[in-house]
Structure formats: C-alpha cells, structure tokens
C-alpha cells in the first residue's frame, strides 16, 4: 500500500535513456500492411473498423474536409492502440502525459484554424462576435471568444489526460485494496475483485471512447473551418 500511486505515469528510462519514443512507435507494429489477395481475420476486422470509423467521422465534411480523413483515422488508431497498450500490467501510457497530448492537440487545432482563416476569413472572424451584440459589449465578447478559441487545444489535451490518469489511478487503488483485504476478509476481497474486473472492462471502453472523442472534436473543429 506504500507504493507510489504515480509510479506508472513516470517516463521509463533504460540505461539512462528515455524510451518513450520507442513506446510511442510500438503501436504502428500492430497494424500490418496487407500483402495478400485474401486477408486474414485480424486484418479484415481492422479494415472494417477503420472504414466504419472513417464513415462516421467524415460523413458531414465537404470535399476539402475529407482530405483530412487519412490523418484523422491515423490519429484515432494511434490514440486507441496507445490507450489499450497502457492497460497491460507494468506498462506505460504515453497519453497520460499532458505534454504529449498537447503536442498532438496544438498542431491539429492550429492547422484547422489556419485553414479557416485562409479559406473563410470573414466567417472565421465573424465567429469572434455573435450577431446582434450591443456595441458596448463588443470588446469584452471579442476577448472572451478569442480566449475560448485558444483554450480549445488545452481542453482537448486535458480531457484525454484526465480520463486516462483517473482510470489508471482508480484501478491501482482498488487493486491495492483487494490485495490488502485478502488477508483480512476474503468475502470483502472477492467483492472488490469483482468491482475491479468491471472497472477493467470499463477502462477498456474508456480507452476507445476517449480516442474517438479526441478525433471527433478535431473533426468538428475542421468542419467549422472548411
């Protein structure tokens, strides 16, 4: 019970060298490129899920927005596989690091905003001032809308970080409690183990849902600017 709760979120170091880059690159090995005329079941399921997700994300986009489909699907697969790998025992979850999530959110958000100001300058500027605003409120509302615009990438990163971190901490606490209760009361330990099992299943779902939510919000930002 004296184990550090945040030990699993520390950057792993081997021989004094951080191996975060290798961990981030590892999920790409889980999606092999098909080189056969007839694919196996695993690749077929991957392709079906990819097409289904792509259809859900890009159905409301115009042709300009649909050019981002490959990037958005790659983003979803990367975040989902990274979150799921973090569920393995004694593993490291890169998406629990706010710095990494900001590194994904800021460039994607900046790209959508840049496209909006380049293609629809007037409409993008009009979003900073709601229609029918009284004259004396214009400076304040422009400032508020500008701040809310710049908060979008921070909200993206914090949402993903908070959900992944909270789930892992909860699993750690309940797992530690289960081990401690085994020597005190087996019935109570059994109940906490059942709760732990249900939370593990829920955390697998959260890993996929958070990947989809992150990608969906980027898609919505893109839709507003194309």
Image: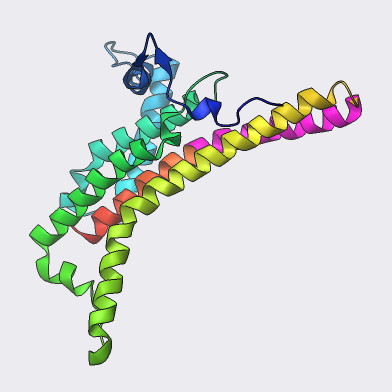
Q: Position of residue 115 (x, y in %)?
A: 14, 54
Residue extent of the magenta highlight: 186-207
Which residue is located at x 39 percent, y 30 percent? 48
Q: Is residue 223 above or below residue 25?
A: below
**Residue found at x 36% / y 27%:** 47
Answer left or right for 136 relative to 154: left
Check if residue 171 falls in the magenta segment: no
With 175 as the anchor, is 22 left or right in this view?
left
Q: Residue drawn at (20%, 59%), measured in percent from left and top?
A: 225
| Residue 22 horizontal/vertical position (percent) | 33, 17
Say which of 61 and 220 sits in front. Answer: 220
Query: In the displayed image of the protein, which residue is found farthest to the left?
Result: 118
Q: Residue 202 magenta-drawn? A: yes
* 29 w.r.t. 103: above or below: above
Position of 2 compared to 77: left or right? right
Q: Quadrant of the C terminus?
A: bottom left
Q: Is residue 210 visible?
A: yes
**How many discs mark residues in the rendered view?**
0
- Which secondary structure class fits the magenta region best? helix
Q: What coloring was used for the rendering?
A: rainbow
């Amino acid at each position: 019970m004296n184990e550090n709760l945040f030990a699993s979120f520390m950057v792993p170091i081997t021989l004094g060298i951080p191996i975060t880059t290798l961990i981030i690159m590892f999920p790409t090995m889980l999606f092999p490129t098909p080189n056969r005329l007839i694919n196996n079941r695993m690749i077929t399921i991957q392709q079906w899920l990819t097409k289904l997700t792509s259809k859900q994300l890009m159905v409301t986009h115009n042709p300009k927005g649909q050019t981002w489909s490959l990037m958005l699907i790659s983003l979803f697969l990367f975040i989902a596989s990274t979150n799921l790998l973090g569920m393995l025992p004694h593993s490291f979850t890169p998406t629990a690091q706010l710095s990494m999530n900001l590194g994904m959110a800021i460039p994607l958000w900046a790209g959508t905003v840049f496209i909006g100001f380049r293609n629809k300058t007037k409409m993008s500027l009009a979003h900073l001032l709601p229609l029918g605003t009284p004259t004396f409120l214009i400076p304040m509302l422009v400032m508020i809308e500008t701040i809310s615009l710049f908060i979008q990438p921070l909200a993206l990163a914090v949402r993903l970080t908070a959900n992944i971190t909270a789930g892992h901490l909860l699993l750690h606490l309940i797992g530690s409690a289960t081990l401690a209760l085994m020597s005190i009361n087996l019935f109570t330990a059994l109940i906490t183990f059942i709760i732990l099992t249900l939370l593990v299943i829920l955390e697998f779902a959260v890993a996929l849902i958070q990947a989809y939510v992150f990608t969906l919000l980027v898609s919505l930002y893109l839709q507003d600017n194309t």
